[in-house]
Image (cartoon, rainbow, N blue to C red):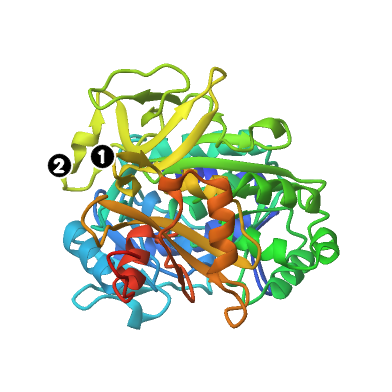
Amino acid sequence: MPETGQPVLTEALLAPHFAERPAVQADTLILSYAQLRGRVASTINQLRSAGVDSGDRVLVLCPNGTGHIIAVLAVIACGAIAVPLDPAAKAGRLRDATRQTRPRCCLVENEAAAPAGIKALRLSSNSDMAGHTTVALATISPDQPALIRFTSGSSGHAKGVVLTQTQQLWTASRLARAFGLDSRHRELVLLTMSSSGGWQRVAATLLVGGCVIIGEPPLSIGSLLDDIVATRATGFFTPPPLVRMLLAAPADRVRKALLDCRNIEIGSAALSTTELNTFLPLVPNARVFVHYGLTECSRAAILDTRAHPDRVNTVGTALPGVTNSIRDEDGNDLPAGLPGEIHLRSPHLATGYWEQPDLNQRFVNGWLATGDHGHLDADGFLTLLGRHDDLINCGGHCYFPAEVEQLLGTPSGVEQYLVAGVADPRGVLQEVPWAFVVPIDATSWTPEAFLALARGNLPGHMVPRHVVTVPRLPLTASGKPDRLETVKLYAATQEVSPDG
């Protein structure tokens, strides 16, 4: 796929010297790097024919699969800006993204997925065109925007994070190095590629000549374990709920299925120390990583749990090249051990938000004020406490739900739960903690044992005043439990007396 310009990221991820190696595997379809390059070239021509030019925005509404990878790489290679969204995204997010970015067109695998009024281009997936297609491109600056990724953050309002060619390539190379990925790596993709967490694992795998395996959403742990064995996957990235499902499965079956895994990354939310220490023996041959990051600064801190078993209550140290700082409300650096807001500086830090200058006040002098709170120890290990918006103020006692959850671990009979602050019905304490619990067996589970554990392990102001049994916990687009949405969904339906 010779070009006259410099599509920095696309060329790096589809290096010619990997031509005959398998790049993507989706069910029975396996594409080599040469074939993938050919399909990207075909899509570039398709975009050019539709009038897409450098700087134009192009919506990518493709589900996890080969088509998503082709679409994003083709848009970036044109010098245009890819705006990836999950086709199953809520209508409000799609509407906000379309209104803010004013896309030239939309790349889809099914025309019905395109929003009204936006020209739909259906990916043509039958032509490989490997090695014999010339694509004329304008010169592309490595520092021009490559992606706009939409995230809700704590505000609930969609905002587009702007990421450049250089930032994306820097992230992929640093992650590949941190995780020890090479051309033998076979990445099973479980999270949506429209999120930073899912895409960065894909990019890091392609950068080193590995193979990306498209996983179907796991309907059960059994089918997931079967897929890992059948595809010979050597690694994957997962949110904590999936790890908890693995912990609930027969240990011998999990250990056998994951025997060939060499790299497992856990992110998007925290596992308790007990859960993590229970999981590690199930994957004896794998390095298991925990990370902290945001769409604005992906994987800012990483913990290798094998190398630091005494720090599994943290999210690790800053990725090489990243600097973190804990600051008070006045912006002053705090010494080790004192909690405050996490600030980050890095070469892969986003350049800001697309056409939302009022939000760019979070970016000051090359630093990002994350809105997350935590503290550093003397060796630079970061303990994450939670979002500022999650802070519970219970009669002057201020603390984060994550502190409560860390102390409680995973109580018996509980599949998943979270703690959140709810307005005190008496109007005295401002907020009181509630627990929202998904039990393993809702027909036999009662909250008494949960409350007994809480009273035995927590100071009085942290003990949940009410325990609500729920069928599920709503998640954010990146797979994190959504505390605000949980309270909206379930707290309002509960009748609690002022004395309860």
Q: Nearer the viewer, residue 384 or 445?
A: 445
Instruction: Give the x, y percent position of residue 248.
Output: 71, 66
Residue under the image location 23 percent in, 52 percent down: 428
Q: Which residue is mark 2?
A: 357
Residue kind at label 2, given as amino acid type: Pro
Closer to the camera, 229 or 155? Answer: 155
Which quarter of the rendered picture does the C terminus lie within?
bottom left
Q: Is residue 425 left or right of residue 314?
A: left
Asked if labels 2 and 1 touch by Cβ distance under 8 angstroms, the answer is yes
x then y, percent, for residue 179: 65, 38
Q: Earlier in the sequence, mark 1 or mark 2?
A: 1
Task: Locate residue 340 relative to residue 439 in the image: left or right.
Answer: left
Please, what secondary structure does the residue beneath circle 2 have? helix
- Callout 1: 10 Å neighbours few (<14), some, many (20+)? many
Q: Residue at x 18, y 76 (%)?
A: 117
The kind of residue tagged 1 is Gly
* Residue 1 placement (x, y as % from top left): 50, 52
Q: Indicate left or right for 431 with 221 as reference.
A: left
Q: Secondary structure at mark 1?
A: strand
Q: Residue at x 59, y 55 (%)?
A: 453
Q: Give coordinates of residue 257: x percent, y percent.
A: 81, 62
The label shown at residue 352 is 1
The residue nearer to you, when weighing 308 against 196, is: 308
Residue at x 20% of width, y 38% of height:
360
Q: Residues within 10 Å of mark 2 (few under 14, many from 20)?
A: few
Q: Is residue 118 left or right of residue 466?
A: left
Q: Is residue 210 visible?
A: no
